[in-house]
Amino acid sequence: MTSIIVIFSLFVALTLGITVRASRRTRSAEDFYAGGRSFTPLQNGIAIGGDYMSAASFLGIAGIIALSGYDGFLYSIGFLVAWLLALLLVAGPLRNAGRFTMADALTARLRERPVRTASGISTIVVSIFYLIAQMVGAASVVSLLLDVKSDAAKIWVIVAVGALMIFYVAVGGMKGTTWVQIVKAVLLMVGAAVMCVLVLARFHFDLGELLGAAADKSGKGASFLRPGLKYGATDGWSRLDLISLGLALVLGTAGLPHILVRFYTVPTAQAARKSVNWAIAIIGVFYLMTLVLGFGAAALVGSAAIKKADPSGNSAATRLAEVLGGGHGTGGGSFMLAFIGAVAFATILAVVAGLTLTSTSSFAHDLYANVIKRGKVGGQEETKVAKWSAVVVGAAAVALSISARELNVAFLVALAFAIAASANLPAILFSLFWRRFNTRGALWGTYGGLGAAVLLVLLSPVCWGGATTTKPSTKLTPETAATCGVPVKSTAVGNATALFSCTVKAPFPLENPGLVSIPVGFVAAAIGTLTARRRPEEDQAFDELEVRTLTGAGAV
Protein backbone atom coordinates (compact mmCIF):
# COMPACT_ATOMS: atom_id res chain seq x y z
CA MET A 1 0.00 0.00 0.00
CA THR A 2 2.82 2.41 0.86
CA SER A 3 4.59 1.85 -2.47
CA ILE A 4 1.34 2.49 -4.33
CA ILE A 5 0.76 5.79 -2.55
CA VAL A 6 4.39 6.88 -3.10
CA ILE A 7 4.38 6.13 -6.84
CA PHE A 8 1.00 7.82 -7.30
CA SER A 9 2.21 10.86 -5.41
CA LEU A 10 5.34 11.09 -7.58
CA PHE A 11 3.30 10.98 -10.79
CA VAL A 12 0.87 13.62 -9.59
CA ALA A 13 3.71 15.83 -8.31
CA LEU A 14 5.52 15.53 -11.67
CA THR A 15 2.46 16.59 -13.66
CA LEU A 16 1.67 19.43 -11.27
CA GLY A 17 5.27 20.68 -11.56
CA ILE A 18 5.07 20.63 -15.36
CA THR A 19 1.81 22.56 -15.23
CA VAL A 20 3.13 25.25 -12.90
CA ARG A 21 6.28 25.70 -14.98
CA ALA A 22 4.26 26.00 -18.20
CA SER A 23 2.00 28.61 -16.59
CA ARG A 24 4.96 31.02 -16.35
CA ARG A 25 5.19 31.02 -20.17
CA THR A 26 1.46 31.39 -20.81
CA ARG A 27 0.93 35.11 -21.34
CA SER A 28 -1.57 35.49 -24.20
CA ALA A 29 -4.75 33.89 -25.50
CA GLU A 30 -2.70 32.22 -28.24
CA ASP A 31 -0.45 30.67 -25.56
CA PHE A 32 -3.45 29.46 -23.57
CA TYR A 33 -5.45 28.03 -26.50
CA ALA A 34 -2.71 26.86 -28.91
CA GLY A 35 0.54 26.77 -26.91
CA GLY A 36 1.88 29.68 -28.97
CA ARG A 37 1.96 27.34 -32.03
CA SER A 38 5.47 26.52 -30.90
CA PHE A 39 5.50 22.70 -30.85
CA THR A 40 7.43 20.62 -33.39
CA PRO A 41 5.67 17.88 -35.42
CA LEU A 42 7.31 15.17 -33.29
CA GLN A 43 6.30 16.82 -30.03
CA ASN A 44 2.77 17.39 -31.27
CA GLY A 45 2.55 13.85 -32.67
CA ILE A 46 3.49 12.39 -29.28
CA ALA A 47 0.99 14.73 -27.61
CA ILE A 48 -1.75 13.64 -30.05
CA GLY A 49 -0.92 10.06 -29.15
CA GLY A 50 -1.10 11.00 -25.48
CA ASP A 51 -4.46 12.65 -26.05
CA TYR A 52 -5.83 9.72 -28.03
CA MET A 53 -4.46 6.77 -26.04
CA SER A 54 -6.94 7.21 -23.27
CA ALA A 55 -8.29 5.12 -20.41
CA ALA A 56 -10.48 3.45 -23.04
CA SER A 57 -7.37 2.31 -24.90
CA PHE A 58 -5.36 1.03 -21.97
CA LEU A 59 -8.10 -0.21 -19.62
CA GLY A 60 -11.26 -0.57 -21.67
CA ILE A 61 -9.92 -2.32 -24.77
CA ALA A 62 -7.75 -4.71 -22.75
CA GLY A 63 -10.85 -5.51 -20.68
CA ILE A 64 -13.14 -6.04 -23.66
CA ILE A 65 -10.60 -8.34 -25.34
CA ALA A 66 -10.13 -10.27 -22.09
CA LEU A 67 -13.90 -10.80 -21.79
CA SER A 68 -15.03 -10.96 -25.43
CA GLY A 69 -11.98 -12.17 -27.34
CA TYR A 70 -12.04 -11.51 -31.08
CA ASP A 71 -14.95 -9.08 -30.91
CA GLY A 72 -13.03 -6.87 -28.47
CA PHE A 73 -10.15 -6.73 -30.95
CA LEU A 74 -12.41 -4.73 -33.30
CA TYR A 75 -12.09 -1.71 -31.02
CA SER A 76 -8.32 -1.65 -31.57
CA ILE A 77 -8.72 -1.79 -35.35
CA GLY A 78 -11.41 0.88 -35.46
CA PHE A 79 -9.50 3.35 -33.31
CA LEU A 80 -6.41 3.00 -35.53
CA VAL A 81 -8.01 3.00 -39.00
CA ALA A 82 -9.85 6.21 -38.12
CA TRP A 83 -6.61 8.19 -38.37
CA LEU A 84 -6.42 7.72 -42.15
CA LEU A 85 -9.47 9.95 -42.58
CA ALA A 86 -8.00 12.56 -40.24
CA LEU A 87 -4.69 12.52 -42.13
CA LEU A 88 -6.02 12.57 -45.70
CA LEU A 89 -8.96 14.97 -45.39
CA VAL A 90 -8.86 17.03 -42.22
CA ALA A 91 -5.45 17.78 -40.68
CA GLY A 92 -3.90 20.14 -43.23
CA PRO A 93 -7.01 22.02 -44.43
CA LEU A 94 -8.34 22.50 -40.90
CA ARG A 95 -5.00 23.89 -39.68
CA ASN A 96 -5.00 26.51 -42.44
CA ALA A 97 -8.70 27.34 -42.08
CA GLY A 98 -8.91 27.88 -38.33
CA ARG A 99 -7.30 29.65 -35.41
CA PHE A 100 -8.13 28.11 -32.01
CA THR A 101 -11.28 25.96 -32.31
CA MET A 102 -13.26 23.93 -34.82
CA ALA A 103 -15.76 26.78 -35.15
CA ASP A 104 -13.01 29.11 -36.45
CA ALA A 105 -12.71 26.94 -39.56
CA LEU A 106 -16.48 26.77 -40.11
CA THR A 107 -17.07 30.50 -39.70
CA ALA A 108 -14.39 31.33 -42.25
CA ARG A 109 -17.19 30.99 -44.83
CA LEU A 110 -20.45 30.79 -42.81
CA ARG A 111 -22.42 33.20 -40.62
CA GLU A 112 -20.57 33.52 -37.37
CA ARG A 113 -22.98 33.66 -34.43
CA PRO A 114 -25.37 30.77 -35.23
CA VAL A 115 -22.56 28.47 -36.42
CA ARG A 116 -20.35 29.21 -33.42
CA THR A 117 -23.28 28.53 -31.10
CA ALA A 118 -24.01 25.15 -32.69
CA SER A 119 -20.34 24.18 -32.83
CA GLY A 120 -19.73 25.25 -29.24
CA ILE A 121 -22.64 23.22 -27.91
CA SER A 122 -21.58 20.15 -29.90
CA THR A 123 -17.97 20.44 -28.72
CA ILE A 124 -18.98 20.61 -25.07
CA VAL A 125 -21.38 17.65 -25.32
CA VAL A 126 -18.81 15.40 -27.07
CA SER A 127 -16.07 16.39 -24.62
CA ILE A 128 -18.24 15.67 -21.58
CA PHE A 129 -19.13 12.18 -22.88
CA TYR A 130 -15.42 11.52 -23.36
CA LEU A 131 -14.64 12.96 -19.90
CA ILE A 132 -17.09 10.56 -18.30
CA ALA A 133 -15.17 7.59 -19.72
CA GLN A 134 -11.85 8.84 -18.33
CA MET A 135 -13.23 9.47 -14.85
CA VAL A 136 -14.92 6.09 -14.69
CA GLY A 137 -11.56 4.54 -15.62
CA ALA A 138 -9.84 6.49 -12.85
CA ALA A 139 -12.31 5.23 -10.27
CA SER A 140 -11.72 1.65 -11.42
CA VAL A 141 -7.92 1.93 -11.26
CA VAL A 142 -7.65 3.62 -7.89
CA SER A 143 -10.28 1.37 -6.29
CA LEU A 144 -8.29 -1.69 -7.37
CA LEU A 145 -4.94 -0.32 -6.25
CA LEU A 146 -6.16 0.77 -2.83
CA ASP A 147 -8.36 -2.33 -2.52
CA VAL A 148 -11.51 -0.34 -1.83
CA LYS A 149 -14.84 -1.58 -3.11
CA SER A 150 -17.28 0.95 -1.71
CA ASP A 151 -19.17 3.29 -3.99
CA ALA A 152 -18.21 6.21 -1.76
CA ALA A 153 -14.51 5.62 -2.47
CA LYS A 154 -15.11 5.56 -6.24
CA ILE A 155 -17.08 8.78 -6.01
CA TRP A 156 -14.26 10.54 -4.15
CA VAL A 157 -11.76 9.36 -6.76
CA ILE A 158 -13.91 10.90 -9.50
CA VAL A 159 -14.11 14.16 -7.54
CA ALA A 160 -10.31 14.20 -7.06
CA VAL A 161 -9.68 13.67 -10.79
CA GLY A 162 -12.08 16.50 -11.52
CA ALA A 163 -10.18 18.82 -9.18
CA LEU A 164 -6.83 17.94 -10.77
CA MET A 165 -8.04 18.45 -14.33
CA ILE A 166 -9.43 21.88 -13.44
CA PHE A 167 -6.02 22.82 -12.00
CA TYR A 168 -4.15 21.61 -15.11
CA VAL A 169 -6.33 23.65 -17.46
CA ALA A 170 -6.78 26.79 -15.39
CA VAL A 171 -3.08 27.05 -14.54
CA GLY A 172 -1.18 25.51 -17.46
CA GLY A 173 -3.36 26.06 -20.52
CA MET A 174 -2.34 24.33 -23.76
CA LYS A 175 1.40 24.43 -23.01
CA GLY A 176 1.04 22.69 -19.68
CA THR A 177 -1.51 20.23 -21.03
CA THR A 178 0.67 19.33 -24.02
CA TRP A 179 3.75 18.58 -21.94
CA VAL A 180 1.68 16.48 -19.53
CA GLN A 181 0.41 14.52 -22.55
CA ILE A 182 3.93 14.03 -23.92
CA VAL A 183 5.23 12.69 -20.59
CA LYS A 184 2.18 10.48 -20.20
CA ALA A 185 2.50 9.04 -23.75
CA VAL A 186 6.13 8.06 -23.15
CA LEU A 187 5.29 6.42 -19.80
CA LEU A 188 2.32 4.58 -21.27
CA MET A 189 4.32 3.20 -24.19
CA VAL A 190 7.12 2.06 -21.87
CA GLY A 191 4.69 0.47 -19.41
CA ALA A 192 2.72 -1.32 -22.13
CA ALA A 193 5.93 -2.54 -23.83
CA VAL A 194 7.27 -3.98 -20.57
CA MET A 195 4.01 -5.81 -19.94
CA CYS A 196 3.92 -7.17 -23.50
CA VAL A 197 7.44 -8.57 -23.23
CA LEU A 198 6.60 -10.21 -19.89
CA VAL A 199 3.38 -11.71 -21.27
CA LEU A 200 5.06 -13.09 -24.39
CA ALA A 201 7.93 -14.47 -22.30
CA ARG A 202 5.42 -16.54 -20.31
CA PHE A 203 4.42 -18.23 -23.58
CA HIS A 204 7.89 -18.52 -25.11
CA PHE A 205 7.13 -15.64 -27.51
CA ASP A 206 4.66 -17.89 -29.30
CA LEU A 207 1.42 -16.06 -30.19
CA GLY A 208 -0.34 -19.32 -30.95
CA GLU A 209 0.39 -20.61 -27.46
CA LEU A 210 -0.84 -17.32 -25.97
CA LEU A 211 -4.11 -17.40 -27.92
CA GLY A 212 -4.69 -21.04 -27.07
CA ALA A 213 -4.18 -20.40 -23.36
CA ALA A 214 -6.49 -17.37 -23.53
CA ALA A 215 -9.24 -19.44 -25.16
CA ASP A 216 -8.88 -22.20 -22.55
CA LYS A 217 -8.88 -19.82 -19.56
CA SER A 218 -11.76 -17.73 -20.93
CA GLY A 219 -14.26 -20.53 -20.40
CA LYS A 220 -15.55 -20.01 -23.95
CA GLY A 221 -13.19 -22.36 -25.77
CA ALA A 222 -12.55 -21.85 -29.48
CA SER A 223 -15.44 -19.38 -29.78
CA PHE A 224 -13.29 -16.89 -27.84
CA LEU A 225 -11.11 -16.53 -30.94
CA ARG A 226 -13.97 -16.28 -33.44
CA PRO A 227 -16.42 -13.47 -34.22
CA GLY A 228 -19.77 -13.50 -32.44
CA LEU A 229 -19.06 -13.68 -28.71
CA LYS A 230 -20.08 -10.06 -28.06
CA TYR A 231 -21.84 -9.31 -31.36
CA GLY A 232 -23.75 -12.52 -32.11
CA ALA A 233 -22.79 -14.00 -35.47
CA THR A 234 -26.33 -15.37 -35.99
CA ASP A 235 -28.17 -12.30 -34.68
CA GLY A 236 -29.03 -9.68 -37.28
CA TRP A 237 -29.41 -6.88 -34.74
CA SER A 238 -26.05 -7.68 -33.19
CA ARG A 239 -24.44 -7.45 -36.61
CA LEU A 240 -26.02 -4.03 -37.06
CA ASP A 241 -24.66 -3.01 -33.66
CA LEU A 242 -21.21 -4.10 -34.83
CA ILE A 243 -21.52 -2.03 -38.03
CA SER A 244 -22.72 0.91 -35.94
CA LEU A 245 -19.68 0.62 -33.68
CA GLY A 246 -17.34 0.43 -36.68
CA LEU A 247 -18.84 3.54 -38.28
CA ALA A 248 -18.55 5.48 -35.04
CA LEU A 249 -14.91 4.53 -34.47
CA VAL A 250 -13.72 5.12 -38.04
CA LEU A 251 -15.57 8.39 -38.64
CA GLY A 252 -15.51 9.77 -35.11
CA THR A 253 -11.80 10.64 -34.81
CA ALA A 254 -11.97 13.32 -37.50
CA GLY A 255 -14.77 14.99 -35.52
CA LEU A 256 -13.30 14.81 -32.00
CA PRO A 257 -12.80 18.41 -30.82
CA HIS A 258 -9.86 17.68 -28.50
CA ILE A 259 -7.99 16.06 -31.41
CA LEU A 260 -8.85 18.82 -33.90
CA VAL A 261 -7.48 21.60 -31.67
CA ARG A 262 -4.10 19.90 -31.62
CA PHE A 263 -3.65 20.80 -35.30
CA TYR A 264 -3.49 24.47 -34.23
CA THR A 265 -0.49 23.99 -31.91
CA VAL A 266 1.99 23.72 -34.80
CA PRO A 267 3.00 26.60 -37.12
CA THR A 268 1.91 25.21 -40.52
CA ALA A 269 -0.40 22.73 -42.26
CA GLN A 270 2.64 20.68 -43.31
CA ALA A 271 3.64 20.41 -39.65
CA ALA A 272 0.07 19.33 -38.79
CA ARG A 273 0.23 16.48 -41.35
CA LYS A 274 3.65 15.41 -40.05
CA SER A 275 2.21 15.41 -36.55
CA VAL A 276 -0.50 13.02 -37.66
CA ASN A 277 2.09 10.74 -39.28
CA TRP A 278 4.00 10.54 -35.99
CA ALA A 279 0.75 9.98 -34.11
CA ILE A 280 -0.29 7.11 -36.42
CA ALA A 281 3.05 5.36 -35.88
CA ILE A 282 2.86 5.70 -32.09
CA ILE A 283 -0.82 4.81 -31.86
CA GLY A 284 -0.44 1.84 -34.24
CA VAL A 285 2.28 0.25 -32.12
CA PHE A 286 0.26 0.84 -28.98
CA TYR A 287 -2.91 -0.81 -30.31
CA LEU A 288 -0.91 -3.86 -31.36
CA MET A 289 0.24 -4.07 -27.77
CA THR A 290 -3.34 -3.89 -26.46
CA LEU A 291 -4.02 -7.18 -28.25
CA VAL A 292 -1.24 -8.88 -26.30
CA LEU A 293 -2.42 -7.28 -23.06
CA GLY A 294 -6.05 -8.31 -23.57
CA PHE A 295 -5.36 -11.92 -24.52
CA GLY A 296 -2.60 -12.04 -21.90
CA ALA A 297 -5.09 -10.99 -19.22
CA ALA A 298 -7.52 -13.70 -20.37
CA ALA A 299 -4.75 -16.33 -20.31
CA LEU A 300 -3.02 -15.39 -17.05
CA VAL A 301 -5.78 -13.85 -14.94
CA GLY A 302 -8.82 -15.55 -16.46
CA SER A 303 -11.98 -13.98 -17.84
CA ALA A 304 -14.08 -15.17 -14.90
CA ALA A 305 -11.73 -13.63 -12.32
CA ILE A 306 -11.64 -10.34 -14.24
CA LYS A 307 -15.43 -10.20 -14.53
CA LYS A 308 -15.89 -11.07 -10.86
CA ALA A 309 -13.61 -8.23 -9.78
CA ASP A 310 -15.11 -5.74 -12.25
CA PRO A 311 -18.07 -6.71 -14.50
CA SER A 312 -17.03 -4.12 -17.11
CA GLY A 313 -13.48 -5.55 -17.38
CA ASN A 314 -11.76 -2.20 -16.73
CA SER A 315 -9.38 -3.78 -14.19
CA ALA A 316 -7.96 -6.40 -16.62
CA ALA A 317 -4.70 -4.53 -17.39
CA THR A 318 -3.89 -3.72 -13.78
CA ARG A 319 -4.64 -7.27 -12.59
CA LEU A 320 -2.44 -8.61 -15.37
CA ALA A 321 0.38 -6.35 -14.18
CA GLU A 322 0.08 -7.79 -10.66
CA VAL A 323 0.27 -11.36 -11.98
CA LEU A 324 3.29 -10.54 -14.17
CA GLY A 325 5.09 -9.10 -11.15
CA GLY A 326 4.70 -12.28 -9.14
CA GLY A 327 1.09 -12.29 -7.98
CA HIS A 328 -0.95 -10.87 -5.16
CA GLY A 329 0.97 -10.29 -1.95
CA THR A 330 4.45 -10.35 -3.52
CA GLY A 331 6.80 -7.38 -3.67
CA GLY A 332 7.12 -7.60 -7.44
CA GLY A 333 3.38 -7.90 -7.87
CA SER A 334 2.75 -4.85 -5.69
CA PHE A 335 5.37 -2.81 -7.57
CA MET A 336 4.04 -3.72 -11.03
CA LEU A 337 0.48 -3.07 -9.91
CA ALA A 338 1.48 0.34 -8.51
CA PHE A 339 3.55 1.31 -11.57
CA ILE A 340 1.00 0.30 -14.21
CA GLY A 341 -1.82 1.73 -12.13
CA ALA A 342 0.03 5.03 -11.84
CA VAL A 343 0.66 5.03 -15.61
CA ALA A 344 -3.05 4.43 -16.20
CA PHE A 345 -3.89 7.23 -13.79
CA ALA A 346 -1.45 9.57 -15.55
CA THR A 347 -3.11 8.56 -18.83
CA ILE A 348 -6.47 9.61 -17.47
CA LEU A 349 -5.20 12.90 -16.05
CA ALA A 350 -3.59 13.90 -19.35
CA VAL A 351 -6.65 13.11 -21.43
CA VAL A 352 -9.13 14.81 -19.11
CA ALA A 353 -6.94 17.91 -19.15
CA GLY A 354 -7.04 18.00 -22.96
CA LEU A 355 -10.80 17.46 -23.02
CA THR A 356 -11.47 20.12 -20.41
CA LEU A 357 -9.24 22.59 -22.24
CA THR A 358 -11.17 21.96 -25.46
CA SER A 359 -14.53 22.53 -23.75
CA THR A 360 -13.42 25.68 -21.99
CA SER A 361 -11.81 27.05 -25.16
CA SER A 362 -15.02 26.50 -27.07
CA PHE A 363 -17.12 28.18 -24.41
CA ALA A 364 -14.81 31.16 -23.89
CA HIS A 365 -13.71 31.72 -27.51
CA ASP A 366 -16.81 30.67 -29.45
CA LEU A 367 -19.77 31.27 -27.14
CA TYR A 368 -18.60 34.05 -24.83
CA ALA A 369 -16.20 36.14 -26.93
CA ASN A 370 -17.81 35.82 -30.36
CA VAL A 371 -21.50 35.11 -29.66
CA ILE A 372 -22.31 36.85 -26.37
CA LYS A 373 -19.77 39.70 -26.65
CA ARG A 374 -19.82 39.78 -30.49
CA GLY A 375 -16.00 39.84 -30.67
CA LYS A 376 -15.68 42.92 -28.43
CA VAL A 377 -13.54 41.33 -25.72
CA GLY A 378 -9.82 41.37 -24.95
CA GLY A 379 -7.57 38.32 -24.84
CA GLN A 380 -7.00 38.54 -21.09
CA GLU A 381 -10.73 38.66 -20.32
CA GLU A 382 -11.36 35.76 -22.68
CA THR A 383 -8.65 33.69 -21.01
CA LYS A 384 -10.09 34.47 -17.59
CA VAL A 385 -13.52 33.28 -18.69
CA ALA A 386 -11.94 30.09 -20.06
CA LYS A 387 -10.35 29.35 -16.69
CA TRP A 388 -13.63 29.83 -14.82
CA SER A 389 -15.54 27.73 -17.32
CA ALA A 390 -13.10 24.89 -16.57
CA VAL A 391 -14.68 24.74 -13.11
CA VAL A 392 -18.19 24.44 -14.57
CA VAL A 393 -17.23 21.79 -17.12
CA GLY A 394 -15.34 19.85 -14.46
CA ALA A 395 -18.30 19.89 -12.08
CA ALA A 396 -20.70 18.71 -14.79
CA ALA A 397 -18.35 15.88 -15.81
CA VAL A 398 -17.95 14.78 -12.18
CA ALA A 399 -21.72 14.65 -11.61
CA LEU A 400 -22.37 12.61 -14.77
CA SER A 401 -19.39 10.28 -14.16
CA ILE A 402 -20.73 9.32 -10.75
CA SER A 403 -23.92 8.03 -12.42
CA ALA A 404 -21.99 6.07 -15.08
CA ARG A 405 -19.26 4.58 -12.89
CA GLU A 406 -20.19 0.92 -13.61
CA LEU A 407 -19.97 1.11 -17.43
CA ASN A 408 -17.04 -0.06 -19.56
CA VAL A 409 -14.85 2.91 -20.51
CA ALA A 410 -14.13 1.76 -24.08
CA PHE A 411 -17.86 1.55 -24.69
CA LEU A 412 -18.40 5.06 -23.28
CA VAL A 413 -15.72 6.44 -25.59
CA ALA A 414 -17.37 4.71 -28.56
CA LEU A 415 -20.52 6.70 -27.75
CA ALA A 416 -18.47 9.93 -27.79
CA PHE A 417 -17.09 8.93 -31.20
CA ALA A 418 -20.62 8.35 -32.50
CA ILE A 419 -21.76 11.80 -31.35
CA ALA A 420 -18.65 13.45 -32.84
CA ALA A 421 -19.16 11.72 -36.19
CA SER A 422 -22.87 12.61 -36.22
CA ALA A 423 -22.66 16.27 -35.17
CA ASN A 424 -19.21 17.57 -36.15
CA LEU A 425 -17.98 15.60 -39.15
CA PRO A 426 -20.73 16.58 -41.62
CA ALA A 427 -20.17 20.30 -41.01
CA ILE A 428 -16.36 19.96 -41.20
CA LEU A 429 -16.24 17.96 -44.45
CA PHE A 430 -18.98 19.90 -46.24
CA SER A 431 -17.48 23.22 -45.16
CA LEU A 432 -14.05 22.30 -46.50
CA PHE A 433 -15.07 20.58 -49.75
CA TRP A 434 -18.63 21.54 -50.86
CA ARG A 435 -19.07 24.97 -52.48
CA ARG A 436 -22.88 24.91 -52.15
CA PHE A 437 -22.73 24.30 -48.37
CA ASN A 438 -24.21 27.11 -46.31
CA THR A 439 -25.14 28.23 -42.81
CA ARG A 440 -28.50 26.44 -42.72
CA GLY A 441 -26.81 23.20 -43.72
CA ALA A 442 -24.25 23.58 -40.93
CA LEU A 443 -26.97 24.21 -38.33
CA TRP A 444 -29.26 21.41 -39.48
CA GLY A 445 -26.36 18.95 -39.69
CA THR A 446 -24.89 19.82 -36.31
CA TYR A 447 -28.14 19.97 -34.36
CA GLY A 448 -29.71 17.07 -36.25
CA GLY A 449 -26.75 14.75 -35.77
CA LEU A 450 -26.21 15.81 -32.16
CA GLY A 451 -29.88 15.48 -31.25
CA ALA A 452 -30.25 12.09 -32.94
CA ALA A 453 -27.11 10.66 -31.30
CA VAL A 454 -27.93 11.84 -27.78
CA LEU A 455 -31.61 10.84 -28.05
CA LEU A 456 -30.76 7.34 -29.27
CA VAL A 457 -28.22 6.88 -26.46
CA LEU A 458 -30.92 7.83 -23.95
CA LEU A 459 -33.28 5.25 -25.51
CA SER A 460 -30.65 2.48 -25.86
CA PRO A 461 -29.70 -0.53 -23.71
CA VAL A 462 -27.00 1.66 -22.16
CA CYS A 463 -29.75 3.36 -20.14
CA TRP A 464 -32.41 0.62 -19.99
CA GLY A 465 -31.46 -2.85 -18.80
CA GLY A 466 -34.32 -5.07 -19.93
CA ALA A 467 -33.62 -7.77 -22.50
CA THR A 468 -33.47 -6.70 -26.16
CA THR A 469 -32.58 -8.50 -29.36
CA THR A 470 -28.98 -7.30 -29.03
CA LYS A 471 -28.55 -7.42 -25.26
CA PRO A 472 -30.06 -10.46 -23.54
CA SER A 473 -30.34 -9.96 -19.80
CA THR A 474 -29.48 -12.36 -17.02
CA LYS A 475 -31.02 -13.08 -13.65
CA LEU A 476 -30.03 -10.40 -11.17
CA THR A 477 -27.87 -11.52 -8.26
CA PRO A 478 -28.90 -10.48 -4.73
CA GLU A 479 -26.28 -7.73 -4.79
CA THR A 480 -27.30 -6.31 -8.17
CA ALA A 481 -31.00 -6.69 -7.34
CA ALA A 482 -30.51 -4.55 -4.25
CA THR A 483 -28.61 -1.97 -6.30
CA CYS A 484 -31.43 -1.85 -8.85
CA GLY A 485 -34.14 -1.51 -6.22
CA VAL A 486 -35.58 -4.95 -7.08
CA PRO A 487 -36.57 -7.31 -4.23
CA VAL A 488 -33.60 -9.53 -3.42
CA LYS A 489 -35.65 -12.74 -3.76
CA SER A 490 -37.09 -11.60 -7.08
CA THR A 491 -36.62 -13.69 -10.22
CA ALA A 492 -36.26 -10.53 -12.31
CA VAL A 493 -33.72 -10.40 -15.11
CA GLY A 494 -31.88 -7.32 -16.29
CA ASN A 495 -28.62 -5.49 -16.67
CA ALA A 496 -27.25 -4.00 -13.45
CA THR A 497 -25.02 -1.47 -15.27
CA ALA A 498 -27.90 0.32 -17.03
CA LEU A 499 -28.12 3.99 -16.10
CA PHE A 500 -31.90 4.47 -15.64
CA SER A 501 -33.49 1.07 -15.06
CA CYS A 502 -32.11 -2.44 -14.71
CA THR A 503 -35.25 -4.20 -15.93
CA VAL A 504 -37.16 -1.89 -18.34
CA LYS A 505 -36.66 -2.81 -22.01
CA ALA A 506 -34.83 -0.26 -24.17
CA PRO A 507 -36.98 1.34 -26.93
CA PHE A 508 -33.96 1.51 -29.29
CA PRO A 509 -32.20 -1.87 -29.71
CA LEU A 510 -28.65 -0.77 -30.65
CA GLU A 511 -26.06 0.13 -28.02
CA ASN A 512 -24.18 2.47 -30.35
CA PRO A 513 -26.30 5.03 -32.25
CA GLY A 514 -23.82 5.67 -35.07
CA LEU A 515 -25.57 3.57 -37.73
CA VAL A 516 -28.62 5.86 -37.52
CA SER A 517 -27.31 9.16 -36.16
CA ILE A 518 -24.34 9.58 -38.54
CA PRO A 519 -26.50 9.37 -41.72
CA VAL A 520 -29.02 11.68 -40.01
CA GLY A 521 -26.27 14.28 -39.54
CA PHE A 522 -25.11 14.13 -43.16
CA VAL A 523 -28.62 14.03 -44.64
CA ALA A 524 -29.81 16.91 -42.44
CA ALA A 525 -26.81 18.99 -43.50
CA ALA A 526 -27.47 18.25 -47.19
CA ILE A 527 -31.21 19.00 -46.96
CA GLY A 528 -30.59 22.19 -45.03
CA THR A 529 -28.10 23.31 -47.66
CA LEU A 530 -30.26 22.53 -50.68
CA THR A 531 -33.39 24.15 -49.25
CA ALA A 532 -31.67 27.45 -48.44
CA ARG A 533 -31.36 30.33 -50.90
CA ARG A 534 -27.90 30.45 -52.46
CA ARG A 535 -25.90 33.53 -51.42
CA PRO A 536 -23.11 34.85 -53.70
CA GLU A 537 -21.08 36.01 -50.68
CA GLU A 538 -20.94 32.45 -49.34
CA ASP A 539 -19.66 31.17 -52.71
CA GLN A 540 -17.00 33.88 -52.66
CA ALA A 541 -16.08 32.95 -49.08
CA PHE A 542 -15.63 29.33 -50.19
CA ASP A 543 -13.22 30.41 -52.94
CA GLU A 544 -11.14 32.33 -50.40
CA LEU A 545 -11.24 29.42 -47.95
CA GLU A 546 -10.18 26.94 -50.66
CA VAL A 547 -7.12 29.04 -51.48
CA ARG A 548 -6.24 29.29 -47.79
CA THR A 549 -6.65 25.56 -47.08
CA LEU A 550 -4.61 24.50 -50.13
CA THR A 551 -1.80 27.08 -49.99
CA GLY A 552 -1.78 28.41 -46.42
CA ALA A 553 -2.07 31.99 -47.72
CA GLY A 554 -3.78 34.06 -45.04
CA ALA A 555 -3.62 31.28 -42.42
CA VAL A 556 -2.84 32.21 -38.81
Image (cartoon, rainbow, N blue to C red):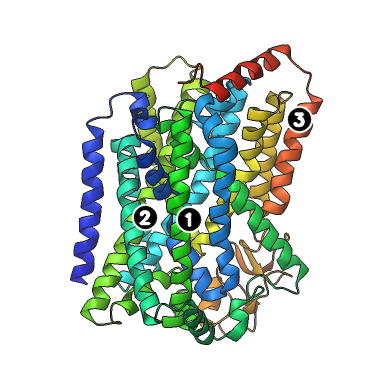
Give the residue at mark 1: 284
Q: What residue type is labelled 1?
A: Gly
Query: Which of the two discs, 3 and 2, labels the residue nearer the N terminus?
Result: 2
The CA distance from mark 3 to mark 2 is: 40 Å
Residue 347 bears which disc, if any?
Answer: 2
Q: Which amino acid does label 3 sit on?
A: Gly
Q: Please tell me in which quadrant of the rendered image residue 458 appears.
A: bottom right
In the rendered image, the vertical position of residue 122 relative to residue 471, given as above or below: above
In the rendered image, the vertical position of residue 66 relative to residue 75, given as above or below: below
Q: Residue at x 53, y 75 (%)?
A: 67
Q: Pointers 3 and 1 in contact (CB under 8 A)?
A: no
Is residue 516 left or right of 304 when viewed as pictured? right
Give the residue at mark 3: 528
Secondary element at image label 2: helix
* Residue 101, position as x, y percentages in the image: 49, 31
* Residue 222, position as x, y percentages in the image: 61, 84
Which residue is more in the foreground, 240 or 160? 240
Residue 97 bears which disc, if any?
Answer: none
Q: Residue at x 43, y 55 (%)?
A: 54
